[in-house]
Amino acid sequence: MKPARSSWVVIAAASLLTGCAASPELVSCLDPNRRVAVELTGYKVKPAPKPKEGEKPGKPGRQNVTMTVQIQGSTAWDVGSAVLKKEGQAELDAMVKEVNSGAGKDTRPTNVEVVIVTGHNDRLEERSHAGLSEQRAKVVTDYLVSKGISSKVIFWEGRGSRDPVAVTKFCDA
């Protein structure tokens, strides 16, 4: 039995669309959506103010700290992969270094209270790699734990292709 002519049209259209979906232009267009966002909150201890003559010493204070890092794009993730590349690791290392030894002249460490890790993937990956955003978030979580951040303060989730990053060029998928 021969397939109907409309079946051939559907097959041809599917082949064409599949080729377009994997085009390098489209993959690079969706690059910002292949990401993991890390938001860390904590505090630094402020030294107690020096007491004036005849006064009791003051108590140390607290300075709240929030750090946000985006590990995104082809420098951090290959399409369809949850393997964190060296460039992505370097971004996380910089954040961990700042947590442990401060930044600039402020060398006080940060006491980490909460870390929220949110994995994302682009629309093309969503179609063919179920659970990829969760895998990426888990990889980043494991990496942070390996660098000394307590697993007790880290919460992670995968958002899939929800919450896309606005791109500045035309992206059609």
Image (cartoon, grey):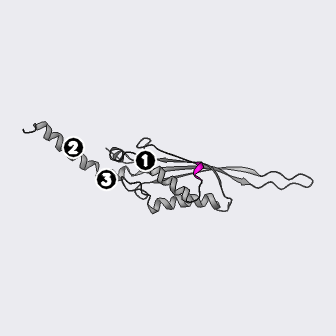
Read off the residue under disc 2. Answer: 14
Which mark's residue is nearer the viewer, 3 or 2? 2
The correct choice, above or below, for 5 with respect to 151 in the image is above
**Is residue 155 within the magenta segment?**
yes
Mark 2–mark 1 Cα distance, whole angstroms, equals 26 Å
- Residue 134 in view here: yes
Residue 28 pos. (x, y %): 35, 53
- Identity of the residue drawn at 38% across and 56% down: 78
- Whether pointer 3 and pointer 2 mark residues with C-beta atoms closer than 8 Å, the reply is no
- Identity of the residue drawn at 34% across and 52% down: 27
Q: What residue type is labelled 3?
A: Glu
Read off the residue under disc 1. Answer: 133
Where disc 3 sits, the SS reads helix
Q: What residue type is labelled 2?
A: Ala
Read off the residue under disc 3. Answer: 25
N-terminal of the pair, mark 3 or mark 2, is 2
The reply, left or right, for residue 107 in relation to residue 116 is right
**Is residue 26 within the magenta segment?**
no
The reply, left or right, for residue 49 in relation to residue 25 is right
Where disc 1 sits, the SS reads helix
- Residue 120 in view here: no
For label 1, count other residues whose C-alpha is less than 10 Å away and answer few (under 14), some (14-19) or many (20+): many
N-terminal of the pair, mark 2 or mark 1, is 2
Q: What residue type is labelled 1?
A: Ser
Q: In which quarter of the image is the C terminus?
A: top left
Where disc 2 sits, the SS reads helix
Front residue of this view, candidates 157 and 73: 157
Residue 103 pos. (x, y %): 63, 60
* Image: magenta residue range: 149-156
For label 2, count other residues whose C-alpha is less than 10 Å away and answer few (under 14), some (14-19) or many (20+): few
- The mark found on residue 158 in the picture is none
